[in-house]
Amino acid sequence: MVTLPELRDGRFDALDAAADAWIVFGRQAEDLSGDTSADLIGPLRASPWAGPAADAAYTLLDKIDDEFEVAAMQVRTVGSLLGGAADELRGLQRQLQALLSSARAQDFTVGDDGSVTPPRQTYAEIHDPDSAQIVQQRMSVARDYAQQVGDILTRATEVDSRCARALGDLITNVYGQEAYEYGDATDDARAAAEALGLTEASIPAAGTDPRQVNAWWKTLTPEQRQLYLTAYPERFGALDGMPSTDRDYANQLALRGYVGDNVNNRLDHGNAQHDRALKLLDKLERSEQGPDGKRLYLLTIDPVGDGKAAVAVGNPDTADYSAVLVPGVGTELDGIGGLIGRASDIQSKAASMDPTSQVSVIGWLGYDTPSLDEDIVTATAGGKSRAGAVALDGFVNGLHASHDGPAHITAIGHSYGSTVLGEAASHGDGLAVADMVALGSPGMRVDNAAQFTLPTDHVWAGAAVDDNFVARPENTASKIPLIGDWIGENANQNIHGPGPHYPGFGGNVLHIDTRGHSGYWDANSISLKSQAAIVLGDYELAPLTSGKAPS
Amino acid sequence: MRRRAGVVLVTALLLAATACSSNDDQPGGTEAPLQTKKKADVEALARQQFESVAQLAGGELIGWEARTAACQGKNGELADDGRWNLTAFATVKLPADKHVAALRAVHDTWVGQKWEIVDYRTLSDGVRGTLSGRDPASGNSISVDSSRPPVQLSLNLGSACYQPAPGEDPANS
C-alpha cells in the first residue's frame, strides 16, 4: 500500500528522468539495429562474398540485428511504463496536495497514516449552545477528508501494482535469439499498455474514416504510439490513415509474431505459409540495407491462407508521386515478390525520369483475388471486385490522410485488378486518384469512362494484341487452352463491361508494345515507361493510339 | 491450400500448352533454346551498353541499379527450369540543351549497328526526347528518356531470358 508520505513527498521528476533514460536507451538500440543493417550486413550483401562462411556470418548478424530490435522494443516499453506511472502518480500527488491544503486551511490535521483530526474547539465554541452540532459537522468533514485521502492512496497503490506487474513481466534473459521473442515483446507491451489505460478498446475500429484515425494518432505522445504499436500490431497494421512508417513497424512485428507462433507450436517445418512469411521478412530487411528510395514498407499483411499484403517501394507519406498497383486473377501472397518487382521497376523508371521528386509505388494485394481454378466462375458476378473496391478505396483514402500535404496518387490495375479499380471509381465518392490505368482488363464494370468520378482524359488503358484475358469481343480465335478459355470467354462476353482499351470506351488508349497477359512491365517496354510517365503526370512520354492526354 | 494446389495444376497445364513468350527475345528465333549465361556476364554487357550510351550522349553514367527475376510466360506462368532475365536502370547527367543531340547520336549509332528502333521522338518543348531500341544480337532492349526537368537521361534495359549458370539461381535471388 502506498503511504501518504510516499505519495505526498514523492520525487517523480526522478522517475521522469529514469523513463527518459530508458527511452533514449531504446532509441539507441533502434539506431544500433539500423547500423547493424546498414553498416554491417548491407556492405557484405553487396560484396561478392558467398559460401558457408558468408552464410554463417549473415545468420549471426541477423541475430544481432534481431537482438537490438527486440531490446529496443522491451527497453522502450520500460520507459513508457515508468513515464506513464510517473504521470499518473504525479496527478494523484496533485490531488492529494490540494486536499491537504484544503484541510490545513480549515485547521484539520491529516496524519501520515491518513487519519484526519478536526480543529480543536475554541472557548467560545465550547460554550456555544450548538456545540454538539458543530463537533458533529467537523467530524463529518474529517471523515470525508479521510475517505478522499484513502481513495487517492488506493488509486496510487493500484497504479503502483499495475506497473510493477507489467515491469515484472518484462524480465527476460536473452533478447532476439529466438523467433518467439517478438511475440513476447508484444505480450509485455500489451500488459504495459493496459496498465497505463491504453486498451485495445480505445483503438479506432477498422473502417473508421482514415482522417479521424490520423487525427487521433497525432494526439498521442511518441511513447504512447510506440507502446500501442508494439502491443497491438495487427490492429494498427490494418488501420487505414496510420502513418506508413508506423504501419510498417506494426505489420513487420505482426509477421514476426506469426513466425514465432509457428515455431512455438512446431508448425514451422514443411509449412509453405511460414516459409513465404520468412521470405517476405528477408526481402523487407534487405531493403533496409539499400537506398532510401528503394526501402520497402509493409502496409498490409495477412499471412494466412491465400494471404494478403501491400508493400510500398519508397515511403508514400513523403513521396511527391505515389501509385497503387492492383494485381488480378490468381495473385496470392506466394507471388508477392513478383508484384513488388513490378512496383519497383515502375518506381525506378519514374524516379529516374524526375530526379527532383520522390516516388513511391505500392504493390497492393489487399483483396482476395479470384483464383484461376474455382473462383473464376463466381468472379464474373463481381463480388470479389466489389469487396476489393471497398478495401482499395479505404486504403487510398488512408494514403491521403497520412501524406505530408496533398498527395498525387495513380491507380494501376492489371487484369481483374482493373475491374476492382473500375468498381471503386464508379461508386460512392469514387476513387481518390489523379489518374487510373487499366492493363489487360476484362472490363471495369461500367459502360464507358464517363461513368468514373475522374475526368475521362485521366483514364488510361492498354492491352497487348495477343492478350486473351481481356475483353476483346472481336477475338474468339486465339484463346489459350483450358482455363484461358474460361477467362477469355467471360471477358469476350463483356461480363465486366466493355474493354477500356477500345476508343469507344472514352478514355486514352495506350500504345502497348509487350506480349501476352503478363508482359506489361517488361523492362524497357514502352508500356513500363508509359506507366512511369502517368505516375509523374508527365503524360507526353506515354504514346497513345487513341484519345488525348491532359495538357 | 486447396486453392494453391489448383493453381499449380493449372500452371502446369498452361506451361504444357503455351510457349514462353520470352523466347521471342532470343537471338535465333522463337524456337531457339535459351542460352545459359552467368549473371555477371549479362550484367557486364548491360553496363557496357549503358556506358556506350553515356559516351555517345557526352555525359557520365551514374546510379546503376539492376535486378534479376524469373522470366514469365505469356500468361504469367513460371517455368521450373530457373530461366531468368535482367532489368537495369541508370542515368546520364546531361544539360538540357544536349538532350536532343544526344538522343540523335545514340539513335544513329544504333541504326548503324542494326538495332530495331521502337520509339524515337522529340517532345513538344523541343528540348526533351525519348528513344527505345532493341539489339537483335544480344536480345537486350534499352530505353533512353529525357527527365523532367531535363537534367539527365533516364536509362533502362531489359535483357533476354537465359538459363541459369551452374550454381546460380538469378530467378529467385
Image (cartoon, helix red, strand yellow):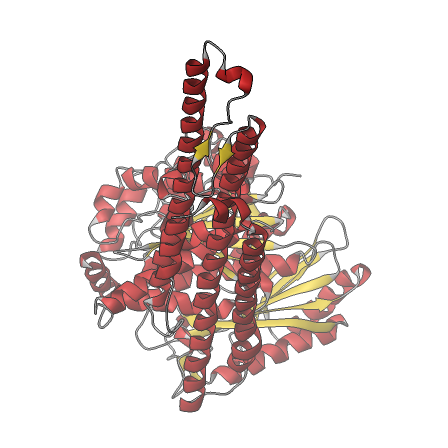
Q: Quadrant of residue A201?
A: top left
| Residue A386 image position (x, y, % from top left) | 33, 37
Q: Seen from this angle, which residue lies furthest left?
A: B2
Foreground pick, A155 / A433: A155
- In the rendered image of this protein, does residue A150 appear above or below residue A221? above
- Work out whether residue A459 can be spotted: no
| Tally of numbered tags | 0
Decide if residue A253 is on the left or right side of residue B89: left
Residue for point 41% across, 22% down = A140
Decide if residue A423 is on the left or right side of residue A378: right
Q: Seen from this angle, which residue lies furthest top?
A: A129
Residue for point 40% across, 37% down = A150
| Residue A89 image position (x, y, % from top left) | 49, 45
| Residue B120 image position (x, y, % from top left) | 65, 59
| Residue B91 image position (x, y, % from top left) | 67, 67
Foreground pick, A369 / A200: A200
- In the rendered image of this protein, does residue A344 appear above or below residue A190? below
- In the rendered image of this protein, does residue A467 appear above or below residue A426? below
- Which image quarter is the C terminus of chain A in? top right
Q: Seen from this angle, which residue lies furthest right?
A: B97
Residue for point 43% across, 71% down = A66
Foreground pick, B132 / A163: A163
- In the rendered image of this protein, does residue A499 appear above or below residue A169? above
- Work out whether residue B39 can be spotted: yes
Decide if residue A387 is on the left or right side of residue A548: left
